[in-house]
């Protein structure tokens, strides 16, 4: 059986930094409101990668307001102090829900449940409630805030498509000393095909390993003794964004004959040709 490892559940360690910089408890809300009054398109902050490093990104319903937002943050002592600890990236991400709307939702919930533990999560454009999912759903319906109120365990639907490359592999180019029979730049690309940001979880040292099957879906020899680390990572992928991950194969291509095969990832097949 091919060892496809499903997306890992994110650990507290993996999410701690994102929660402290893109999520805001009620004590932070007046500071959010000050910026929202100056820049109505302000949608908060989110996470992304630039030049191979994780950075905090500005979020706006109108990215053309980036300069106005940077100026407002720079001239506010609260945000100047807070941003000093951030690795703030360039550019701005387009989000659908402004902070002003999230603040309205948060205050509606507070009015209904004064003792509720709430935070505004601008990475996903949601207000999070520390409560069971069913209770949160009923409360959201009661105060008429729709899908903007979610509980702490909520994760967005994984609206992604995949591709695995290359589609032609030469046996003669696979290094004989490479235990994993690495095929050049074997890679998996993940594209967010939805309208909202998704949270993509992965592990295995930053790789997305793939399996190999015959063209008809049959098994091929595996490489023994492979184990992935338990470290859980995550990557936010914005709508329309494509992210490429390095990969390796669970199967030993050097034991195969030239012919038609397929990469296997997340129950999907991606045909490739193995040549001499």
Image: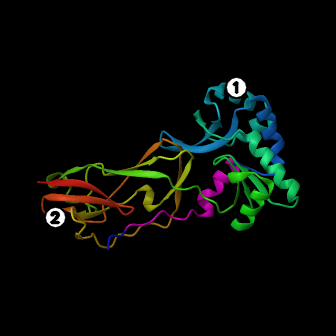
Q: In this view, does 236 lie to the left or right of 266?
A: right
Give the label on residue 222, or none: none
Q: Is residue 97 visible?
A: yes
Rendered image quadrant of residue 271: bottom left
Frontmost residue, 77 versus 140: 140
State the SS at label 1. helix
Image position, residue 205 (x, y; %): 44, 59
The figure's colour scheme reads rainbow
Crowding at mark 1 (Cα within 10 Å: few <14, some 14-19, many 20+): some
Rendered image quadrant of residue 177: bottom left
Crowding at mark 2 (Cα within 10 Å: few <14, some 14-19, many 20+): some
**Which quadrant: the N terminus?**
bottom left
In this rendering, the count of numbered labels is: 2
Give above or below for 224 relative to 176: below
**Which quadrant: the C terminus?**
bottom left
Q: Is residue 185 magenta?
A: no
Image position, residue 20 (x, y; %): 70, 51
Image position, residue 2 (x, y; %): 32, 70
State the SS at label 2. loop
Report the residue marked by disc 2.
256
Residue at 59% from the left image edge and 58% from the top image edge: 14
Q: Is residue 132 visible?
A: no
Give above or below for 124 relative to 31: below
Residue at 67% from the left image edge and 46% from the top image edge: 125
Q: Report the magenta residues as a range.
A: 4-22
Q: Is residue 205 left or right of residue 253?
A: right
Give the label on residue 68, or none: 1
Residue at 25% from the left image edge and 53% from the top image edge: 183
């Amino acid at each position: 059986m091919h060892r496809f490892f499903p997306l890992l559940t994110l650990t507290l360690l993996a999410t701690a930094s994102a929660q402290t910089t893109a999520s805001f408890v009620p004590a932070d809300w007046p500071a959010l409101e000050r910026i929202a009054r100056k820049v109505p398109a302000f949608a908060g902050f989110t996470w992304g990668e630039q030049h191979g490093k994780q950075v905090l990104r500005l979020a706006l319903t109108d990215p053309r307001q980036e300069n106005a937002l940077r100026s407002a943050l720079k001239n506010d002592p609260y945000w100047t102090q807070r941003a000093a600890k951030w690795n703030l990236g360039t550019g701005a991400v387009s989000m659908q829900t402004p902070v002003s709307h999230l603040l309205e939702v948060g205050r509606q919930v507070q009015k209904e449940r004064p003792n509720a533990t709430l935070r505004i999560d601008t990475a996903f454009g949601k207000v999070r409630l520390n409560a069971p999912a069913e209770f949160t759903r009923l409360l959201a319906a009661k105060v008429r805030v729709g899908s903007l109120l979610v509980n702490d365990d909520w994760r967005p639907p994984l609206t992604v498509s995949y591709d695995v490359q290359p589609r032609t592999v030469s046996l003669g180019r696979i290094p004989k000393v490479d235990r994993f029979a690495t095929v050049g730049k074997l890679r998996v690309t993940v594209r967010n095909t939805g309208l909202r940001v998704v949270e993509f979880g992965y592990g295995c040292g930053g790789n997305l390993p793939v399996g190999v099957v015959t063209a008809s879906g049959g098994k091929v020899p595996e490489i023994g003794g492979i184990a992935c680390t338990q470290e859980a990572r995550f990557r936010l992928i914005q709508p329309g964004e494509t992210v490429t991950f390095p990969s390796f194969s669970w199967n030993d291509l050097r034991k195969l004959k030239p012919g038609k095969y397929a990469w296997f990832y997340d129950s999907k097949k991606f045909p490739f040709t193995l040549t001499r």
